[in-house]
Every structure is written in structure tokens, then in C-alpha cells.
Amino acid sequence: MDLKYFSKNGKILPIGEAAIPLSNIEYQYGFGVYENIRVNDGIPYFLDDHVERLLESARIIGIAHSFSEASVRKSVTDLVKKNGAGTPARPNDGHSGRYNLKVLLIGGKEPALYIVCLNPLFPDKKLYTEGADFVTYEYERPFPHAKTLNMLQSYLAYKEAYEADCYDALLINGKGCITEGTRTNFFCIQGRTLVSAPESEILLGVTRKAVLKMAKENGYTLEERELRFSDVIHSDGAFVTSTSSKIIPVRSIDKHAITVASNTLRELMELFDEFLQNCKGKLIPLEAGSDASRAQ
């Protein structure tokens, strides 16, 4: 798609003017937060949830700003409207009419909100059938619930995965447990139970949230606990979630094979694809007190 415009502090400008000065110390040091939002046929998916997390991330790391949830939502919807919906998606082709929004909230004396449209990089289709390979990397993010621009360690972990011809790196905490990927949330499956690292230790992904909602509605349960490598190896399968990839099965971790052809996992993937097709970009909140709502 030809995406001609971006947004700065709610003002729509030509993409050629999108720039951040090299002297911006906050950007240099990663004092900012961000979100990636999927747009399909002019609909920004799960917008409310992304905006809520953006501002919560800013609060966690102490960015003082005047942007409200309403003003960020308006900036997003105005930009999507200006850029247009693109060519309507064709049957069995989720690529046409789709792009991603990157929302950057940068701190400092004059906080700024940048929103830029990006053509997404689509995962190879065979990953959904054959599964993806992963490496492990010892690292704990200092602010697990904040999606920050301070990505050096995650970058180094992903670089190691890329050089090993793997899809992503799974982060290992000080207790030797798997928490999440550098750009993904991680689950393993035992029967119809999805097992995740404790929510206090991970980024609460928006796609993760949507998967948990859909899963609960279809008879799955969630268990939060520490995930050791041996637990995953002996599970009925494992997968990762993200805005760009949806659900991708895990084929191996550090060259140790993981079950991919699980009927339960295949069902979960099909149900989530159906959910995305029918939800119209909205995630209706779960009832307060439910297991999955606590996990969000």
C-alpha cells in the first residue's frame, strides 16, 4: 500500500516530514513507549486495548504527558481515514487492505505522539503448518508490563535467533523459566489448558488477551505458573502470539522438538482466525472475576 501520511501530536502531515531530531535525548535513550496496531480494511483492531496499554506503559516508566485515551484514539482513527482502507481484502487473502500502525509516545520536556503507517512483514505461511524454531536467551525485562523503546537486550536476543535461522528468542528468567519471546507471548498446551508464565512477569499482549477471550468462550482454561524447559518439552504443544503473527506453533526450542500436530492447537488456531474475521476489530470485555479476565 502507498501510505502517504503520518500523525504528530494529532496533526496529519505528509510522510516525507516524518523525522525525529538526532539531538532528541529521550529517543536516543529509549525513554518512550510504543504500540503496533493491526489495520485491516480501514479498521484498527483492538484500538481501545492498545491505547490503554500505551498510556499504562507511559505511566509505569514515568512519562508525563497531556495525551488522553480519547485524543490518542482520535489521532489513530483520523490517520487511518486519511490514508484510506486500501484495496479490499480478497477471500482467503488477509494481506490486501492491511497495514500496521506504529504509535510512539516519547517523553521529555515536550512529549510527542507519533503515529506512522507501515506495510507489515507477513510470516511465511509454512510456519502455521510446520511450526517455528526458537532459541532461548537469558534476560528479564526490567518493566515487564511496559512496552518501551529500550529494546537493546531484546534486539540482541532476536539477533541471536535470526543468526540461528529461528523465528524468535524465548527469554529465560533468573529461575531458569521461560517467560515470553522478544516480540511474542508464549504458551504451552496440556489437554485443553493453556499454560502461561505468571502475568506479573510478562508483557500483557493484546493478541494474548484476544486469544484468552476466544479460548475461554470455547471451553479452554488458563493456568499461570512458572514454565521450565522440561514442562514445555513434555506438553501437548506450544505456540506464540503477536499482532503480526496471530498464533504460530512452536516446532523446536534450542533444537529440541516440540509437538506441532496437536489437534487442540489446530482447533485453537482455526477458532482464532474465525474470531478475527467476525469481531470487527473489537474485544468485548470478559465478566469481572473470570479466570481469563484476571489473566489479561
Image (tube, rainbow, N blue to C red):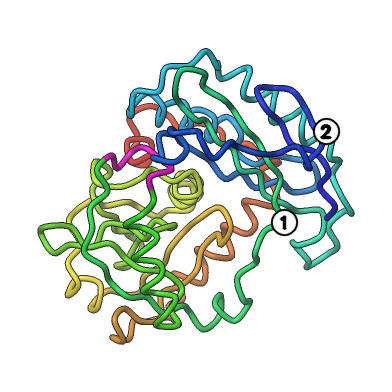
- Mark 2 or mark 1: name the one nearer the start of the chain: 2
Secondary structure at numbered mark 2? helix
Q: Amino acid at mark 1?
A: Asn
Residue that sits furthest to the top in the current view: 66
Q: Which residues are magenta?
A: 143-150
C-alpha separation, residue under disc 2 versus residue under disc 1: 16 Å
Q: Amino acid at mark 2?
A: Lys
Dot 1 alpha-carbon crowd within 10 angstroms: few under 14, some 14 to 19, many 20 or more:
some
**Position of 243 compared to 262: left or right?**
right
**Residue 91 lies in what quarter of the image?**
bottom right
For the stretch drawn in magenta, what is the main secondary structure?
A: loop
What percent of the width, then of the height, locates residue 294? 32, 36
Secondary structure at numbered mark 1? loop
Disc 2: which residue: 81
Asked if the residue under mark 1 is in contact with the one under mark 2, i.e. CB atoms within 8 Å, the reply is no
Q: Please count the marks in the image.
A: 2
Most foreground residue, 187 or 59: 59
Disc 1: which residue: 119
- Looking at the image, is 233 positioned above or below residue 277? below
**Position of 244 compared to 290: left or right?**
right
Residue that sits furthest to the left in the current view: 175
